[in-house]
Amino acid sequence: MSLQPINQNNALNNHHAYVVGMSGCGKTSAAKKKFIKPTDQVAIFDPLKDYDGELAGRKVRSYPNLREFAKALYAGRKTNQGFKIAYAPDHETTEADFDKFCMVVWGAGNGKHKKPLKVICEEVAEHTNTAGKATGYHGKILRLGRKYGLHTVNMFQRGQEVSKTIIDNCQFACVMMQKADDSARYLQQKTGIPATEIVKLKKLEYILQDGKEWVKGVILW
């Protein structure tokens, strides 16, 4: 399989996003409701099987084997049809599993494709080892993926526990309920959203930021 993206396109905009909030606050619900549409092409790193069933009204095809996941993803990218394809290993996942997922996704980038590839990265803090510069293929996608139509949605519980590359390189931030006030203050430093607004958030409530502008809302099912 090819592991290099094609057709670099500097005219493409940054659509990277992250969703941050304590366990049980609704991060996965936010990803499903705010960032994914039925017609999107979507690749998912799904270590906890959170995406079994349907996503945006479409069946998620889930693969425990990386090669089979890659085969399905690359076949899907040869079309202009929407799809939802997940890599969900049967074993307890590691940093290496996440890096291999990102390697496959990196190779699926195409700056001239009619559809971007949306990439849901669950449990980022559990699968990376640094709060500094993002490394490996995840870091490559965050820094360069825009040019190849790669749009990540990065999920984690606390901003302090993940690479600053994520927060610095994402156009969109979805801030949800925080367990501790220091987490709210950290996010204020990184986003400009007042900590006093962040600490008010309850389950399924969010603050969605685009650039420097932000609005509050709630996830409805």
Image: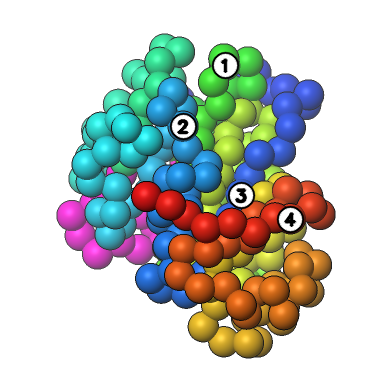
Residue beneath the point at 63% across and 87% down? 181
What crowding class fits label 4: few (fewer than 14 Cα within 10 Å), some (14-19), or many (20 or more)? some
Q: CA distance from mark 1 to mark 4?
A: 30 Å
Q: Secondary structure at mark 4?
A: strand
Coloration of the structure image: rainbow
Q: Quadrant of residue 208?
A: bottom right
Asked whether the viewer can see residue 153, the reply is yes
Read off the residue under disc 3. Answer: 17
In the rendered structure, which amino acid carries the disc numbered 2?
A: Lys
Residue drawn where x is 73% and y is 27% of the image: 12
In this view, the residue in front, 83 or 177, is 177
Dot 1, how many residues are within 10 Å of its Cα: few (below 14), some (14-19), or many (20+)? Answer: some
As drawn, is 162 to the left or to the right of 164?
left
Residue 176 percent across, percent down from the top left:
55, 67
**Which mark is drawn over residue 20?**
none
Q: Which residue is mark 4?
A: 214
